Amino acid sequence: MTRHESSFRDPLGYIFQYKGNIYRHVAHEAQEDYDLLYSSGLYEVLTQKGLLIPHKEVTDPRGTTHDAYKVILPEQLECITYPYEWSFSQYQDAAILTARVQKIALEYGMTLKDASAYNVQLHKGKLVFIDTLSLAKLTQSHWEGYKQYCEHFVVPLLLMSTVDLRMGLLMRDFIDGVPLEIATKLLARRVKARPGVLTHIVAHSAAQKRYAGNQRTAVKHQARKLNRQQLVALIDSLERLVKSLKVPAKMSSEWHKYYEFTNYSDTSFKEKQKFIRDFAAQTKPDAIVDVGGNDGTFVREAQKTIPVLSVAADIDPLAVEEGYRQMLQNKEQSFVPLRIDLTNPSPGIGWANTERTSFTDRMPGKRRLILALALIHHISLSNNVPFQQFAQYLASLGQYLVIEFVPKGDSKVDILLANRRDVFTYYTQKDFEAAFSEHFTIQKSQKLKGTKRTLYVMKRKATA
Amino acid sequence: MKFLLGYLDPNSGSVILQAILGLFLAVGYFFRHTVTGFFRRSSKKNVAAKKVDTTQKTDGEETAE
C-alpha cells in the first residue's frame, strides 16, 4: 500500500494505491460530510449528470489497521494530466465544470471546500470532478474556495486569453494558483476595466493586500452572512466571466493546421498513415503516445486499428486546442491532448518534487507505442540534442517506436539550417541508425515516396 | 512585511470582498434570472401561440378543401 504523494492537503482523507488500484480513505472526521453527500441526493445527481466520478464503497483492502470511516474505490482514471498541460478550451471547460458542481452543491446544502484545478480530470472523453471529499456541508457564510477558484482558473484563463496562450504554464511555477497580484501586474488596463475582472481580480487583489493579516476586520465582515442566493450569484458571476473568455482570434502558430501546409504529397501522407496503422495492429499496444502529436492526426490513425488510450503531446497550444475540439466533436473516449514541450517536459513539482509527477512518470499503459514523426530535426538540430540522448529518452517512454528520419536536403531541415552554421556533422542517417540501435532493434524501415524521409519501426532492446 | 502577512493571511480580503459583492451580484442575478427570464418566457409563449395559430389556420384551410 502506498499513500499517494499528492494526497496530503486534506486531513479528512487521502488516496492510496493498492495492487494497482487507486482507493480513497475517508477519515472518521469526514463522516458527517460524506453521509450528507448521499442522504442529500447530491452524489446521485452529480454522478448521473456525469460531473462527479462514481465510486463504490469497498472493504478496506489494507485490513482494519488504518481505521477508516469508509474506503471507496472510484472509477479508475487511465491518465492523469495537469492544468499547465491543458489547451485553453479544456481549461475553460474545467472551470465551468467546477462552477457547475458548486452551484448544484449549494442547492443541496453542500459546498466545495476548495476549488483546485487538479480536481478535474479527463475521463472517457469528458471532464469529471474527481475529489469526492471536496464536497462538504455548507456551514460557512462565504465560499472558502473563492480565492482558489480565481487563482486556479480565472487568472490563468484570463492571461491565456488576453496575453498569450502559453501563460497557462505559470501554473507549473505556482502550484496553488497564479497569485491575483501577478495578474493585476500582467493584465492590460482595458482588460482590468471589464466588470468581472475588476471585481474578481483587481478588487480581490486589493482587498487581499489591504486586509492581509487583519483578522479583526475579517471577523466583523464574516458576521454579514451570505445567503445561498448570494453564493449562487457569486458563482454565476465567475462562471459568466470564464465563459466570456476566448482563444485570441489573431493568434496563429507554426504548427496549427500544420497538416494543411506540409511538403508531403497526398500519396506519401497516406503511405505514412497506413504504415502507422499496420504497425499499431501488429504490436497491439495498450497505449499510444505521440510525442510530437500536433492535433492528434496520426495517433487517431493508429486508433483505427487499435482503439486504445492515446496521447497526442505537442508544444503548440493551438494544435492541442484543435485536438481537444476534435475530441469533443467526434465524442472520442480514448484521446488525451496535451501541451508538452518534449525538450522540457513537465517535471515533478510541489512538495518534495513528488506532489505532481513528471510527464515521463505519468505515461499511460504498460505496453506503449511511441510515435515520433517529423520531430527529430527539431530535437537534434533546433535543440542540439544528440541522437544518443534522444534514443535513450524515447526508450524510457515505451517498448515500441515509430520514428521518421528527416535528412539534410529536406525542405524543412533546410529552413532550420538556413541562418546558422551547419555544425551537425553527425546528423546523417547512418549515425541516426547507429545511435538508435544502441537502445532499439530496428525491425523495419521504409522510404516515404516523393520525399527524402524514412520511417522506422523499432522495438526496445531488453537491456535498454 | 506585506509578503509575510500574505503568507500568514487567512484570506481576510477574500472574505470581506465576498460580503460586499454578495449584495450587488445577487441583485444582478435576480434581474437576469427572474425578470429577464419572465420576458423570455412570455416571448416564447407568444411565438408558440403564433405557431399554433398558423397551424390551426392551415388545418382549417385543409378542412375547407
Image: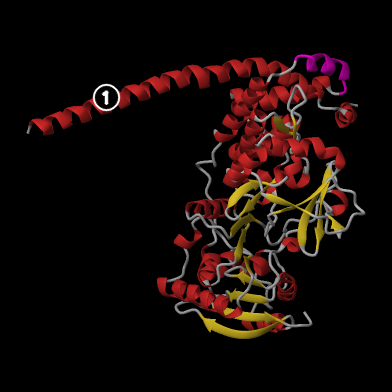
Q: Is A268 rendered above or below residue A63?
A: below
Residue A276 x/y as whole percent: 54, 74
Task: Give coordinates of residue A308: x percent, y percent.
Answer: 59, 67
Q: Which residues are magenta?
A: A213-224
Q: Secondary structure at mark 1?
A: helix
Asked whether residue A160 appears in the rendered view, the answer is no
Q: Quadrant of the N terminus of chain B?
A: top right
The image quarter containing residue A153 is top right
> Which residue carries the number 1 mark?
B50
Furthest-left residue in this view: B65
Task: Report x, y in % for residue A324.
Answer: 55, 52
A132 or A272: nearer the eye? A132
Residue A163 versus residue A276 in the image, above or below: above
Q: Main secondary structure of the magenta part?
A: helix
Q: Nearer the viewer, residue B58 or B26?
A: B58
Residue at 60% over, 26% down = A237
